[in-house]
Amino acid sequence: TRARMFPPRPGQCAYVIDGAHTEFLVTEYSDHVFVVATQVGKLGTVFQCEPRGEADIDYLLDVDPDACAVAVRMRTLIGKRDDTTLNACARHIGEVLYSRGLQKSLVCALGLRSSASVDALRAVASLVIDRVTELLQSPVPATS
């Protein structure tokens, strides 16, 4: 079962987004999911997201309100506390994943270039959502 998962399940990939090599790592633990998206080779700003109710979709990424039905409580654990763009990206990732049924705490590390465009942030968020969804829908390997 997922509740007694050891070792944690990782998934990783890399893409070029807006001309920048971008690495993704998604690791599922028994009590949370840890996501890293980096263009700078470092964790960057680390957020913790947890569901809290219905979403307020009025933020920078300008997404379809029907895509996100769950709001998240955000905490910046490490990094830039005043970067509204990174916060919006992490919030969008959390809202979509929780609206799709994620039941665990989400820790999201975004190490993105300061010059990253809104389109690049959307692409990063979309790839993170796709990779997390893919990992969580795959069967947990049997342990001996």
Image (cartoon, grey):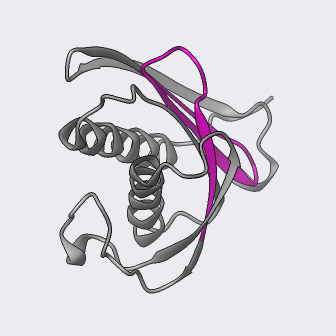
Quadrant in which residue 88 is drawn: bottom left
Provide the residue span drawn in magenta. Answer: 23-50
Q: Position of residue 76 (x, y in %)?
A: 65, 53
Quadrant location, the C terminus = top right
In depth, the one of 42 and 26 nearer the eye is 42
Residue that appears at 31% across and 28% down = 115
Note whether 44 is above or below 74 in the view shown: above
- Residue 123 is left or right of residue 29, and the answer is left
In depth, the one of 62 and 142 nearer the eye is 62
Residue that appears at 46% across and 60% down = 91
Q: Position of residue 56 (x, y in %)?
A: 38, 81
Note whether 2 is above or below 98 in the view shown: above
Q: Position of residue 85 (x, y in %)?
A: 39, 50
Q: Main secondary structure of the magenta part?
A: strand
Note whether 127 is above or below 59 in the view shown: above
Residue that appears at 72% across and 43% down = 29
One can see residue 1 in this view: no
Queried whether the magenta region covers residue 30, the answer comes back as yes
- Residue 46 is left or right of residue 54, and the answer is right
- Residue 22 is left or right of residue 10, and the answer is left
